[in-house]
Image: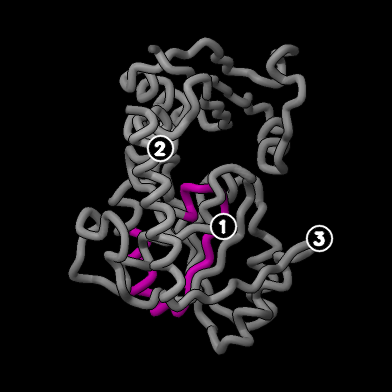
Amino acid sequence: MWAMKVAYYRAFQKVMKIFMMFLDWSEPQLLTGPGAIKKLPGVIKDKGINNVMIVTDKGLMSLHLLDGLFKQLEEDGISYTVYDGVQPNPSIENIEEARAQFVANGCQAMIAFGGGSPMDCAKAACARVVRPNKTIPQMRGQLKVMHKLPPFFAVPTTAGTGSETTLAAVVAKRRLTSRQFMARYDIILKPDGQVEFKTDNKDLFDFSLEEIKEADWELPVVTFDLHNDSVLNEGNVMTEYETRFSQMGNPICKLIAVRNH
């Protein structure tokens, strides 16, 4: 059975690889290095855009990580509106609120600032902007939008899901630790494979614990304060986002999940 599943997924990947050769791909422009965020408004202005929407979350707003972007947008004469209501697991309500704000303010482009949740919310909101007669559930799957999205600019603050590099958006209870994804890991991981996950968001971590248990996986390792766990913290790679929240006194949670069979 395992060999048949592997063969199926490998065949699917090869077919999709051939199919993608016929799609109109646009290579993204990358801004990297210290101070790169201050270059973004100039890129936006050069594209003739003067009104943008920024999708982020309240945690990043409280850290003032967007202050430099706000200042540069104002200096370059670009109007902006901010939607910071994104939840750890962006809901359809989040997406619809962001879409409505985008349309009401006559925005021309979208800036997603944050981790996977703001990225996914912003992408889904853009899809709703160009497909106002289709609901999010109706656009689930591949090749469902089929319309050009508004210009999209991604500013990742984490090194986790890589949502800024993909076409997909994960909504509501379809996060990477949901039972649906755990079922996928059960298929694609090697027999001795495991899932490791860490976050500063307690609600998301609690959600993950419940979902993983419901998926019938074991949790041999769970900590609600990674940096004070000398064993688990050994070799831990800290992102800028993780460092800032730790400095504010917010503990980092981590779990390791293994199959229950």
Residue for badge 2: 6
Q: Are marks 1 and 2 in contact (CB under 8 Å)?
A: no
Asked whether, in this view, residue 252 is left or right of residue 205, the answer is right
Q: Establish if 211 lies above or below 34.
A: above
Per the rendered image, the range of residues in magenta is: 97-119
Q: Position of residue 127 (x, y in %)?
A: 34, 67
Label 1 vs 2, first from the N-terminus: 2
**Image quadrant for the C terminus?**
top left
Measure how far apart labels 2 and 3 are at the Cα level. Answer: 42 Å
Amino acid type, mark 1 = Phe
When asked about the image quadrant of residue 206, the answer is: top left
Q: Position of residue 37 (x, y in %)?
A: 70, 65
Residue for badge 3: 34
When asked about the image quadrant of residue 255, the answer is: top right
Q: Which residue occupies 63% across, 28% down?
A: 250
Nearest to the eye among marks 1 and 2: give it: 2
Q: Secondary structure at mark 1?
A: strand
